[in-house]
Image: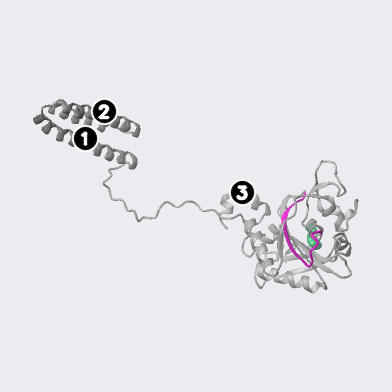
Amino acid sequence: MLNEIKKLRESFNQEIDGISDGDSLDELEVSYLGRKSGKLNNILRGLKDLAEDDRKKVGPLANKLKKEIEENIVIKRKELIHGKASEEFFDVTLPGTKFPEGHLHLVTQAIREITHIFEKIGFTRVKYPEVEWDYYAFGALNMPLDHPARDEWETFFIDAEPVGPKGKRILTPHTSSGQVREMEKGKLPIRMINISKCYRRQADVSHLPMFHQFEGLLIAEQVTIANLKGTLEYFFKNYYGPDRKYRLRPFHFRFTEPSFEIDVSCDLCQGRGCKMCKAGWLELGGAGMVHPNVLKAGKIDPHKYSGFAFGWGVERVFLMKPGLNIPDIRMLYNNDLRFLQQF
Ligand code: PHE
């Protein structure tokens, strides 16, 4: 019996030395310590057949070997996992591996910031459909069918035949389609900020086929251009800081009278003129006093109520933030992490 224990120790030591992967170590463990046919258990099981004196000698030795085998297996397993002896000093206070941390997309950040600025002065964020009826995008905005002004919006039409009185379905080319939808809710006064996706057939350094607009609409009694200008001023100061230059240019929209386009001094060329802007000013979008016909379409009495509206591109407004220096609006949507991670 003593001899068998000695041999078992030797064979175990030899076998464990040759092991280099976890699976073989598991097999070795079972072949020595396994309950049914493990080599050591065979010996322990035979103890009961020994004379009492022998049992007293062999028993402790067999148990000692069992412990030894168990310990060696634990050490070997650690070695296989860590590739080195387990006794080595391990500093548990070292910082762990850092997981890469992302951030919200630049356009999402811009939408949140714009929303926040307008919420502070009582506007409520809404969202209207991207697939829209002709009626809300044009008809209700004082642009009857076949009116030439519609051409300015380079609209995508959906092939399906019109159903119902609201005409064809389109991909909304501007957030002004939310104006009459908001009025149809029947609640006054209105202080809406509609931020939604818009689509137009256009793509170059300053245009995207899919982009976002934010549309402000305020309807109440005695609203004047002074309120519109004050609101724009407030937005510019809060979004760009106190020194940024902007201008209102007289323009024409069918759904506002009078109408303006709003430009901001170009941050890329500091007003010198570049590919992004025209002669130092970048057009952000339009604005004006809501046309009485639009109020009528929304069942609001133009003799009692008046209002202003403005609609600007989120991406363009964002690009003009001081110091960004992004030379092409399409870069925002290339999804190149090397670009996005810089912000
Ligand atoms: N919807 C217009 C555009 O996309 C902008 C605009 C909005 C003009 C509101 C006037 C009032 O060009």
In the rendered image, residue 12, in percent from the top left (x then y), is placed at: 22, 30
Q: Earlier in the sequence, mark 2 or mark 1?
A: 2
- Please tell me which residue lies in front, 80 or 61: 61
Judge whether residue 168 is colored magenta. no
Q: Which residue is mark 3?
A: 335
Which percent across, then down, holds residue 224? 82, 72
Q: Is residue 259 visible?
A: no
Identify which amino acid the numbered label 1 is placed on.
Lys
Which residue is drawn at the image coordinates 8% and 31% (left, top)?
Answer: 53
Report the Cα–Cα distance between label 3 and label 2. 59 Å
Q: Which mark is residue 101?
A: none
Q: Amino acid at mark 3?
A: Asn
Q: Is residue 196 magenta?
A: yes
Label 2, label 1: how far apart the Cα atoms are: 11 Å
**Picture coordinates of residue 209 (x, y %)?**
73, 49
* Secondary element type, mark 3: loop
Task: Indicate which disc, 1 or 3, sits on the residue closer to the N terminus.
Answer: 1
Mark 1–mark 3 Cα distance, whole angstroms, equals 60 Å
Kind of residue at badge 2: Gly
Please report whichever mark, 3 or 2, sits nearer to the chain's N-terminal start: 2
Q: Nearer the viewer, mark 3 or mark 2?
A: 2
Query: Which residue range is magenta in the image?
Result: 184-200
Badge 2: few (under 14), some or many (20 or more) residues near its Cα, within 10 Å? some
Assign a secondary structure to mark 1. Answer: helix
Q: Nearer the viewer, mark 1 or mark 3?
A: 1
User: Which image quadrant for residue 311?
Assistant: bottom right
Residue that badge 2 annotates = 38
Q: Circle 2 — which element?
A: loop
| Some atom of ligand 1 lies within 8 Å of the CB belonging to the residue at label 2 | no
Identify which residue, 62 or 268, lies in the foreground.
62
